[in-house]
Amino acid sequence: MVNEEIMKSLAIKTESKIVLLVTDGIGDLPSENNKTVLEKAFIPNLNKLASKSACGLTDPISCGITPGSGPAHLSLFGYDPIKYQIGRGVLEALGIGMELTSRDLACRGNFATLNKEGIITDRRAGRIATELNVKLCTLLQDKINQIGDVEIIIKPGKEHRFVVVFRGDGLEDALSDADPQKVGEKIKFAEPLDSKAKKSVETVNEFMKQATEVLKEHHPANTVLLRGFAKHPGLPTMKELFKLTPAAIATYPMYKGLAKLVGMDILETGESLSDEFKTLQDNFSRYDFFYLHIKKTDSYGEDGNFEQKIKVIEEVDKYIPEVLALKPDVLVVTGDHSTPALMKGHSWHPNPFVLFSKYIRVDEAEQFNEKECVKGGLGRFPAVDVLPLMMANALKLQKFGA
């Protein structure tokens, strides 16, 4: 990748516009009839786009490394995901509009199901309704607002997700997740990764014990899992690094938080795909970089729901002509990572990638899927190179050297 100082020296402000459409977890593995969801889906517009574009496959971190959503997105935004390692708690907190201080330790929470033997049987409590989430967070906040000298702040997210911020002196983020990461395991408490995190661990584990007691009659959401403990990292913004005026269109808090962390304006939008694409249209004159995030491809991949993942991709396909009608100078369609329905989780498999611009060399790829994109002229490359590619094709980079 090109280092930050070189990118800062090369970047120029122009009127050209870039649209980065991220269909979360879109990469897949052959399942039904030995086809991936992209091969099976009816996506004439995406296929036509691919046939007129430069195509390839991207690795979010490196070959064989399964990424979380945070580092996978940071790569797409032009940040070294190894240098900038950000806990999910910060992203979730920023995504729901919380302001973090230097005394804050933030984490992402899941409501979960605990059986009588102390075994986690569902890490998402059946994806409870957001309305129930709000009620349970209010209950927890009423019952647990202080542990020792640490203030406890609890805010609901969507479905089973919520945020906890521990506010106090001496809190460090060098602690393990309090989450077994899979069903069939006993409830897991946080452990220190550094002796300085002793207070954090004691506070977090006490919170978990008290929360489980408060929730014991609220099956299936009768316990909590906590992960992604983090403090605010203070990243340079996309405006500072790349001279972009960026905006984000997303429905889930974590992705709003990630966008906010790199200096994007968060555009208010509704919950549906039509709302998101309408928001792009309504704001197209105001910004020169748009990040539009589609979540449900990833959600259905995690659920192992092959057919529903197909339906979301087919719905996205219908809006491609509307995006092209806006005449962006660069349009990229890709995923942040792969979430094969067969695996029910993130994987290390590279993501299909399409870049449309009048300055590209059209290659041999004829469709938007894994088998075709591997034929593309861009080959297989690190996702951290996506932003320089987009900026080059939008004529936003000067020549390097004499």
Image (cartoon, rainbow, N blue to C red):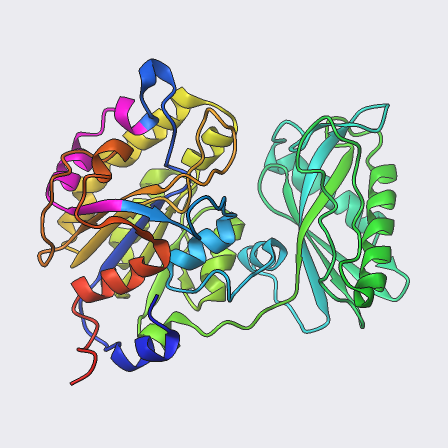
Number of marks in the rendered image: 0
The residue positioned 28% from the left and 34% from the top of the image is 370
Of residue 65 and residue 233, the one placed in the foreground of this image is 65
Q: Is residue 17 above or below residue 235?
A: above
Residue bounds of the magenta highlight: 38-56
Of residue 40 and residue 13, the one placed in the foreground of this image is 40
Q: Position of residue 250 (x, y in %)?
A: 42, 49
Q: Determine whether, in the image, residue 299 is placed left or right of residue 218.
A: left
Q: Determine whether, in the image, residue 16 is placed left or right of residue 380.
A: left
The image quadrant of residue 132 is top right
Q: Determine whether, in the image, residue 212 is placed left or right of residue 237.
A: right
Q: Position of residue 113 (x, y in %)?
A: 74, 29
Q: Position of residue 199 (x, y in %)?
A: 85, 63
Q: Position of residue 305 (x, y in %)?
A: 46, 22
The residue positioned 54% from the left and 56% from the top of the image is 95
Q: Is residue 48 magenta?
A: yes
> Is residue 96 visible in the rendered structure shown here?
yes
Of residue 301 and residue 156, the one placed in the foreground of this image is 301
Residue that extends furthest to the top in the rendered view of this protein: 33
